């Protein structure tokens, strides 16, 4: 089995650099119906899909988010810019956290900043958080390169024909452990919101 991991990493890094978040100014200034919401999200988040057929957000998902208090209910079946910002947060959290954790995390935000008619609202929260993106991507790339270098030093005594696969397995395990530890930390932080 031959896997060119360094080429694969370069390709992944190229993908990372092509990813971009939805800027608040990209969101229409008018309230949207459900079909418009799903179309907008599909178009703007399509680069984040793992497989071409994967759905970003479906009507059922959005209805469930509103039903489970993750998303404030729409007004007359229309979703505001603030709804869209909350949906983007949900989209990024849903692959990492449980619905209960997302609810615990977002409820204080939506209670305080959703439709608060003040100078500091959901849009300001969103902009602040996503402004950190570029610096984090650079750190992530450096960290992945270091972990990759560590994995290339493993399994030196393994049979030659298996070494590359085992080193890739080692790299995946290092990344998985890192993700597991960060997920555990996030869950503890979310739990602290409830105490």
Image (cartoon, grey):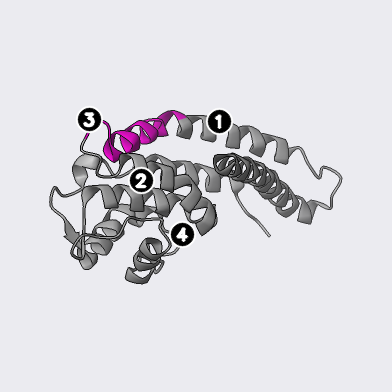
Disc 2 crowd rating (10 Å Cα; few below 14, some 14-19, many 20+) is: many
SS class, disc 1: helix
**Separation (CA) of disc 4 from disc 3:** 37 Å
Q: Please give the range of residues in magenta.
A: 118-135
Q: Is residue 54 magenta?
A: no
Disc 1 crowd rating (10 Å Cα; few below 14, some 14-19, many 20+) is: few
Q: Is residue 132 magenta?
A: yes
N-term mark: 4 or 3: 4
Q: Marks 4 and 2: which is nearer the front?
A: 2
Q: Quadrant of residue 7?
A: top right
x 65%, y 45%: residue:
184
Q: Which residue is mark 2?
A: 110
CB under 8 Å between discs 4 and 1: no
Q: Which residue is mark 1?
A: 142
Q: Which residue is mark 4?
A: 50
SS class, disc 2: helix
């Amino acid at each position: 089995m031959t896997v060119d991991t360094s080429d694969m990493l370069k390709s992944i890094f190229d993908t990372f650099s092509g990813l971009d978040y939805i800027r608040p100014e990209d969101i229409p200034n008018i309230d949207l119906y459900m079909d418009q919401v799903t179309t907008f999200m599909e178009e703007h988040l399509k680069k984040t899909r793992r497989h071409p057929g994967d759905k970003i957000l479906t009507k059922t998902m959005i209805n469930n988010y509103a039903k489970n208090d993750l998303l404030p209910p729409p007004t007359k079946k229309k979703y505001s810019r603030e709804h869209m910002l909350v949906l983007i947060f949900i989209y990024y959290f849903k692959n990492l956290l449980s619905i209960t954790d997302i609810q615990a995390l977002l409820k204080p935000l939506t209670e305080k900043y959703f439709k608060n008619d003040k100078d500091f609202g959901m849009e300001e929260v969103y902009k602040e958080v996503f402004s950190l993106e570029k610096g984090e991507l650079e750190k992530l790339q450096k960290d992945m390169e270091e972990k990759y270098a560590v994995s290339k030093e493993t399994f030196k005594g393994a049979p030659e024909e298996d070494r590359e696969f085992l080193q890739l397995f080692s790299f995946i395990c290092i990344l998985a452990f890192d993700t597991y530890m960060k997920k555990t930390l996030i869950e503890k932080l979310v739990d602290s919101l409830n105490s």
